[in-house]
Structures are given as structure tokens and as C-alpha cells.
């Protein structure tokens, strides 16, 4: 799946990362296997998104902590990605509430300093990474 480089996607990733950092990942989270490294892309939007993602989104989305979908969990991401990037941008910007009315992911990922453009770049980076990592499992 190809995603147009949209700033809103980056902002989503950033927000998701911020949520993880603020809420904490809780007990039972694990570090990735030794040698695991998130992808790096030459595209400037994805490079900016990676920076935001590493600083904020990584806390929960690297390993799927606090109920966040991990970047390595393609089956969990596939239906989200199918909804389109506009839907993906909204969650980190506006937050996600659970059935109890409490935020599972606070608006802007809990980092009010992030711009919409940064969140969108982070979301675009996360989606590109999910696809890249999935392709790596299909073609090791």
C-alpha cells in the first residue's frame, strides 16, 4: 500500500507515541529482539515522522504496550490502514476514549507541543514502517 506523504499521518504517529510516554507502558512490556532497528526512509516527511515517532510514539507502539498496536503487528494494523490515512490522523489528534470514558490515548498523544504536521508525519512513518516490516517477514 502506498501512502501519499501527508503531514497529518505524521502527527498521528507522534500523538500515539506521546500517549505511550505519558501513560507509561506498564508492566510486562518487553524490549525488541537484539539488533532490531526501526526502518529509515530517505523521504523527508518520513524522516521527520521517524524522529517524532522515536521520541513519542515508540513508547507504546514499538512493542504494543498499553493496548497500542505494535508496528510489528500487521494483522492489527491492516483494518486500520484500510480505513485510510484521514481516519488514522484523527485518532492521535483527538485522542481515543475507552468504554469507561477515559482516554486510552490522550489528544495529541499527550504532547501539546506537537503540530498537526508532525503528528501526520509520524503516522505516515508508522504506516510505512508497518508495511515495510510486514514485507520483511514475507521476504526475509
Image (spheres, rainbow, N blue to C red):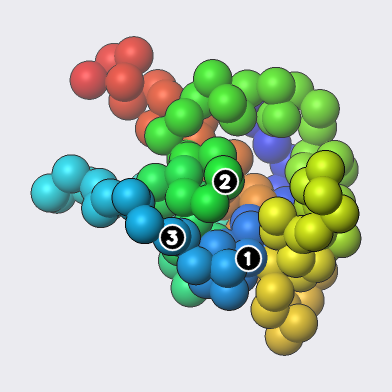
Identify the residue at the far front of this view.
100
Pick whichever, 10 or 65, lies toward us: 65
Residue 34, x across and y down, in percent:
12, 49
Residue at 63%, 65% in the rendered image? 19
- Apparent side of residue 80 relative to residue 78 in the rendered image (left or right): right
> Which of the two labelled residues, at mark 2 and mark 3, occupies the earlier sequence position?
3
Residue 73, x across and y down, in percent:
46, 30
Q: Which disc is residue 41 wearing? A: none
Identify the residue at the far top of this view.
138
- Apparent side of residue 117 relative to residue 62 in the rendered image (left or right): right
SS label for mark 1: helix
Measured in 3D between alpha carbons, the distance from the residue under mark 2 to the one under mark 1, in whole angstroms, is 9 Å
Residue at 57%, 46% in the rendered image? 68
Measured in 3D between alpha carbons, the distance from the residue under mark 3 to the one under mark 1, in whole angstroms, is 12 Å
Say if residue 33 shows up in the picture: yes
Q: Which disc is residue 68 wearing? A: 2
Residue 35, x across and y down, in percent:
14, 49
Residue at 58%, 26% in the rendered image? 76
The residue at which mark 3 appears reads as 26
53 vs 32: above or below: below
- Apparent side of residue 138 relative to residue 48 in the rendered image (left or right): left
Q: Residues within 10 Å of mark 2 (few under 14, many from 20)?
A: many
* Comparing labels 3 and 1, the label whose residue is closer to the camera: 3
Pick whichever, 47 or 38, lies toward us: 38
The residue at which mark 1 appears reads as 19
Amino acid at each position: 500500500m502506498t501512502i501519499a506523504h501527508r503531514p497529518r499521518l505524521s502527527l498521528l504517529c507522534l500523538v500515539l507515541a506521546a500517549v505511550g510516554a505519558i501513560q507509561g507502558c506498564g508492566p510486562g512490556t518487553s524490549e525488541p529482539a537484539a539488533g532490531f532497528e526501526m526502518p529509515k526512509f530517505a523521504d523527508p516527511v518520513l524522516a521527520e515522522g521517524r524522529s517524532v515517532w522515536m521520541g513519542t510514539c515508540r513508547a507504546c507502539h514499538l512493542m504494543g504496550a498499553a493496548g497500542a498496536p505494535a508496528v510489528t503487528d500487521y494483522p492489527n494494523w491492516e483494518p486500520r490502514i484500510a480505513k485510510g490515512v484521514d481516519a488514522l490522523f484523527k485518532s492521535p489528534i483527538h485522542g481515543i476514549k475507552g468504554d469507561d470514558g477515559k482516554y486510552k490515548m490522550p489528544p495529541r498523544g499527550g504532547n501539546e507541543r506537537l503540530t498537526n504536521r508532525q503528528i501526520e508525519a509520524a503516522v505516515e512513518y508508522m504506516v510505512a514502517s508497518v508495511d515495510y516490516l510486514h514485507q520483511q517477514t514475507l521476504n526475509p
